[in-house]
Amino acid sequence: MSRPSLTYPLNIATSLMATALRTGMGIITSPAVHQPAQLLELYEFEGCPHCRLVREVLTELDLDAQIYPCPKGGERYRAKVLEMGGKTQFPYFVDPNTSSAMYESADIIKYLFTTYGSGSVPVQWKLLELQRFGSTLASIPRMGQGISVRPSRKPEQALELYSFESSPFARPVRDVLCELELPYVLHSVGRSRGSDWVPPMFRDALSVTSEPGTRNRQRLLERAGRISIPYLVDPNTGSEMAESADIVAYLNTTYSQS
């Protein structure tokens, strides 16, 4: 678990509350008109309400990104942000496809929609102060998860995580990845079809089959045989797994040094 004093059931309960407070943001995807050739880069930390807004847009546009976790007290990537941008402020976004780099969630969100989306910012994202307020509220139930660094062993290769921002089961996994400063490729797997809303256990029981509507859902189905979020791939150990609790335990056992 990302914090020893927080039991896993409570962790999931507070994550469900955070999802409810975001009222459907970071779940549904409408794939970007243009997909970047190179991975976008995001320096952020999970418990930051401003970073959450950017991750929600990544889900909405079905965009993948290389995540560099920068929790408070972290030393792995915070210095790099200072070197590149001149200050340790988050989120910090880099697009190697256009040589663009910027702070400020508002600027990043506008950039993503105008560069990779339809060209205009949707109405709900023009109301940014309201979104910021909602994101700040959503951070309260998490009780400091995904904010502060914990000692860890750095992996040689970045991990991979199939996730969508408001998944209550993916959030505890991202908390641990952040706290342990483990870099990972975020594969967005937002929901685009009605069948995507059916939980995996019910899909299996009812034999519900549906061709995935997005590239990453198709890739995950081909890779794992089913679509279950979150799904972790660790190229350092050859391990792959679903189930939030198992992934959290694996990350702590494999990389935590606390």
Image (tube, helix red, strand yellow):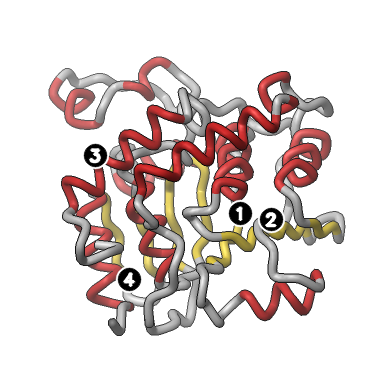
The three-letter code of the residue at mark 1 reads: Ala
Mark in front: 3 vs 2: 3
Dot 1 alpha-carbon crowd within 10 angstroms: few under 14, some 14 to 19, many 20 or more = many
Q: Which mark identifies residue 238? A: 4
Residue 217: x %, y % from top left:
44, 37
| Marked residue nearer the N-terminal end (1 or 2) | 2
Secondary element at tag 1: strand
> Which of disc 3 and disc 1 is earlier in sequence?
3
The residue indicated by pointer 2 is: 40
- The tag on residue 13 is 3
- Around disc 2, counting alpha carbons within 10 Å, would you say few (fewer than 14), some (14 to 19), or many (20 or more)? some
Name the amino acid, label 3: Ala
Q: Which mark is residue 65?
A: 1
Residue 98 pos. (x, y %): 86, 55
Mark 1 → mark 4, Cα distance in angstroms? 21 Å
What distance separates the C-alpha of mark 4 from that of mark 3? 31 Å
Residues at discs 1 and 2 in contact (Cβ within 8 Å): yes
The N terminus: image quadrant:
bottom left
* Residue drawn at 38 percent across, 48 percent down: 171
